[in-house]
Image (spheres, helix red, strand yellow):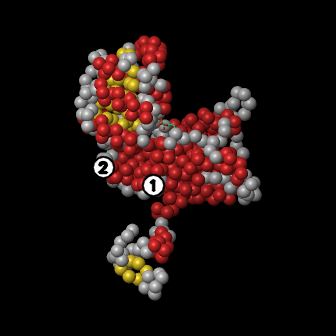
Amino acid sequence: AAANIGVVGLAVMGSNLARNLASREGNTVAVYNRSRTKTDELVQAHPEAGFVPAFSYEEFAASLSKPRTAIIMVKAGGPTDAVIDELVKVFEPGDIIVDGGNAYFPDTIRREKAVRETGINFVGAGISGGEEGALNGPSIMPGGSDESWVTLGPILKSIAAVADDGEPCVTHIGHDGAGHFVKMVHNGIEYADMQLIAEAYDLIRRGTGRTPAEIADIFAEWNTGELESYLIEITAEVLRQVDAETGKPLVDVILDQAGAKGTGAWTVQTALSLGVPVSGIAEATFARSLSSHPEQREVARVLPGPGTEFQVDDADGFVEDVRQALFASKIIAYSQGFDEIRAGAAEYNWTIDLGAVSKIWRAGCIIRAQFLNRIADAYAEQPELPVLATAPYFADALTRGQAAWRRVVIAATQAGIPSPAFSSSLAYYDGLRADRLPAALVQGQRDFFGAHTYKRIDKEGTFHTLWSGDRTEIEAEDTH
Ligand code: 6PG
């Protein structure tokens, strides 16, 4: 038994993760892939890694020191289940199976429960950072038992990205599906962040006539301030890219239909079940869906717009407004995402340290940003903070930015430019801070047609108005 860690599944993510592991002091890495060629190729291409190749699950298990620890990097769903079944046959109680794919957290809860019955530990670990991150340092969100963390923690710390303060971007998120839950919300936030940036670009381009290359400069400039983040940085690079074939900006020749592998939808579906209004994430997910229906978009071209040219008078002023609107909306997106994690932890009995989550997102992952230090500060100050956006730093930014935010949403609305993430974030902000909401009327309507009852602001109890009778009010059973 020569290896202390193994990787099953040697596609790009798996290979890169295996190479990352092998490059760290103290690790010897066993590798296994269903088809032998991938294993041979990896081992031959990287002699420096000192991989221990295995060509059967028995061989793989025999090459690992105890407790055996293996990270599965195969497709979520059926392929993951198939590998788990095989590993369970050759592993022993106390060993650790880690699923490093983008699993749906209820699957992770189910798998953890089933594997635990064999005495083997099962850890669902979210891994973010794409291929580059897997190779050089991802952000890792492991769930699973405390026992598994004892062995796994040091290994994962050795390969994780390192934040500016030297802390590795990995923490034990919580039991069973907690890690994959948090990774799911990470992706939801990623969707919102990307959509907000896309809306900002679109508004600047259409409102000021700036070229993609000029807008790239604007994003590069923004990347030196409070918006500094990986997604802003790569946006500048994408906008600057010129298509070799046509000489046009690449962004103008890419088909405008956004794909999605489902993690954004999971975030929204889960939020709906939990009753958490992640409206920015939902709009970002729906914006991708809308873009991907060319047949409907074709037919809908007949529908009229406002019929006016969109041209802002003060281009620089507008760009600054958009920057502030972007920052304000971003605060809301993260606030909603953390709200979902808080609610998920309550529902599934996980103890999740929200400050620790924000810290491990500071480097390695797709949503890495300076901003996450501020979130960490907010939770350090007030661990039970009910609404992230109300933390002093964020509340102050929203106070400063709200006038610009409103101007941008007004301009977009008047010009007929869709800005679903900007405008829904603003609606959420206004809804949350409202003294009184028209939800009172909704309760009245519900009581009218379904005797669903209502509460009153001035006394305890549950009430119903006899709408089809004499319209007097009676005390009633609480039916919600
Ligand atoms: C990450 C990313 C990654 C995700 C892709 C694709 O954290 O490294 O979130 O896990 O799968 O970005 O996501 P979509 O295809 O759904 O956009």
Q: Which of the image's four quarters has the C terminus?
A: bottom left
Q: Which of the image's four quarters has the N terminus?
A: top left
Q: Quadrant of residue 62?
A: top left
Give me the residue at 31% from left, 47% from top.
350
Q: Position of residue 440 (x, y in %)?
A: 47, 72
Q: Quadrant of residue 255?
A: top right
Q: Is residue 476 above or below residue 184?
A: below
Other-residue count near label 1 (Cα within 10 Å), few / some / many at <14 / 14–19 / ≥20: some
The local secondary structure at tag 2 comes to loop
The residue that mark 1 highlights is 272
Which amino acid does the dot numbered 2 rest on? Asn
Give the Cα separation between the discs numbered 1 and 2.
Answer: 18 Å
Q: Position of residue 354 (x, y in %)?
A: 36, 46
Residue 115 seen from this side? yes
Q: Position of residue 49 (x, y in %)?
A: 40, 16
Give me the residue at 61% from left, 35% from top.
238
Q: Within 8 Å of ligand 1, the CB of disc 2?
A: no
Residue 349's label in the rendered image is: 2
